[in-house]
Amino acid sequence: MRQLNLDQLRTLIAIVDLGTFSAAARALHLAQPTVSLHISELESRLGAPLVVRGNRRITPTAAGAALVERGRKLLRDTDDAIETVKRQAEGRVGRVRLGTSTGVLVDLLPQVLEALGAEHSGIDVEVSIRGSYEAMERLAAGTLDIGLVAIPQPPLRGIVVTPWCEQPMMAFVPRRWKAPKRVTPAWLAAQPLIFNEATTHMYRLTMEWFAAAGFAPRARIELNYDAAMRSLVAAGYGAALLPLQQSTDTARNDRMQILPVSPKLTRRVGIAHRQPAMLDGATLSVLKVLTTFRQT
C-alpha cells in the first residue's frame, strides 16, 4: 500500500471539522472537485469508506474517525518538523562549535555570547580552547565551525579568515622589579622570561619582536595558558609579553606592572570559517553577531 498523502489527510480532517465538502474547499482554498477527489483517492488507497455523505452534514465512519484522530497528531508532528527545519535554516536554532584562545575567551567572547543569547537563544555555542594552528586544522576537517585565530594565517583551501580585533602587546612585570616606563627588547631580554609554547603564534610574534632588535632570549618556562602566565608574573617568577585584556588587566593589580613596549607590538585576531555557502543558518547567525564586535 502506498503511503498516506498528507494533503488528502488534511482535507479529510477539514471535512469532518466543518461538516461539508464546500466548507472544507473554502477553508483549504481548493476547488470542490479537488476535495472530492482527495477523499475518493484516500478511500481507495485504504480500502474503506471514510465519510458518510448526509443531506446536511458529512460525518466520519468508524474508520474515518480513527484516521482523523491519528491524522491530527501526524499533521502536528509534520508541522513541528517543518518548523524545526525552517528555524535551523534561518539560523534561529542549532549548535555551533567555536574554538578560541584563552585571551579572547576572557576578554571579548563573554560579550559576544551575551549578545548572542539575547538575539538567538535557541543557538548553543560549544566553546573549546584551541591554538590557532589546531583551530585551522579542525575547521578544514569539519570538526569546528568557527575559529578565533591569530593572523596572518597561511592560506588554507576552503577556509575564509577575516580580521576581527587587535590587542596591544604589553610587558607584564612583577611589581617589585624596577622597570622602565616603556619596556624595550634589550631590557626585557635581560630578565627571566615566561613565554608561550614554541608551537604557538604568540611565541613567533614575541620572538620576531626580539629578533628585530637583535636579541634571541630563552625563556625560563614555556606554557600555553595566559592566566597561568600572569599568575607566575605576579609571583615574581619572571616577565611575560602578553596581549592586554581590557576586561581584567585594567583593574588594579598590586603584584604586577603592565607596561607598554617599544617598539609597539600588536596581536591581531581573525574569524576563520568555511565558505559561507557551506555553513548552516546557526553558524551564519553567530558570525553575524561576531562581526558586530569587530574592532579593526
Image (spheres, rainbow, N blue to C red):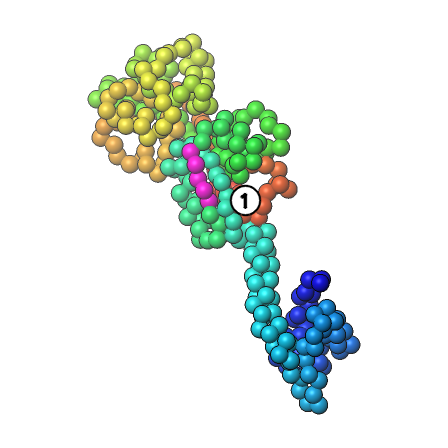
Residue nearest the observer in this picture, 221 or 104:
221
Q: Position of residue 220 (x, y in %)?
A: 32, 15
Asked whether residue 126 is drawn in magenta, I would say yes
Residue at image position (66%, 70%) is 9
Q: Position of residue 228 (x, y in %)?
A: 31, 28
Q: Is residue 29 left or right of residue 280?
A: right
Residue nearest the observer in this picture, 109 or 1:
1
Residue nearest the observer in this picture, 212 or 220:
220
Q: Specify the amino acid type for callout 1.
A: Thr
Residue at image position (40%, 21%) is 197
Dominant SS in magenta: strand
Residue nearest the observer in this picture, 161 or 167:
161
Q: Quadrant of residue 199?
A: top left
Q: Which residue is mark 1?
A: 283
Q: Quadrant of residue 272?
A: top right
Q: Is residue 47 left or right of residue 112?
A: right
Q: Position of residue 89 (x, y in %)?
A: 59, 51
User: From this viewpoint, is residue 162 visible?
Assistant: no
Residue at image position (22%, 30%) is 254
Residue at image position (44%, 23%) is 200
Instruction: Report the residue that reaches farthest toward the right.
Output: 33
Q: Is residue 219 left or right of residue 22?
A: left
Start and end of the magenta stretch?
A: 125-129
Q: Position of residue 43 (x, y in %)?
A: 72, 73
Asked whether residue 137 is drawn in magenta, I would say no
Q: Is residue 79 above or below residue 137?
A: below
Question: Tag 1's secondary structure?
Answer: helix
Q: Is residue 152 left or right of residue 58?
A: left
Please rate how many residues cluster around mark 1, counting C-alpha atoms within 10 Å: few if below 14, some from 14 to 19, many from 20. many
Instruction: Report the residue that reaches farthest toward the bottom.
Output: 55
Q: Is residue 31 above or below residue 178?
A: below
User: From this viewpoint, is residue 80 visible?
Assistant: yes
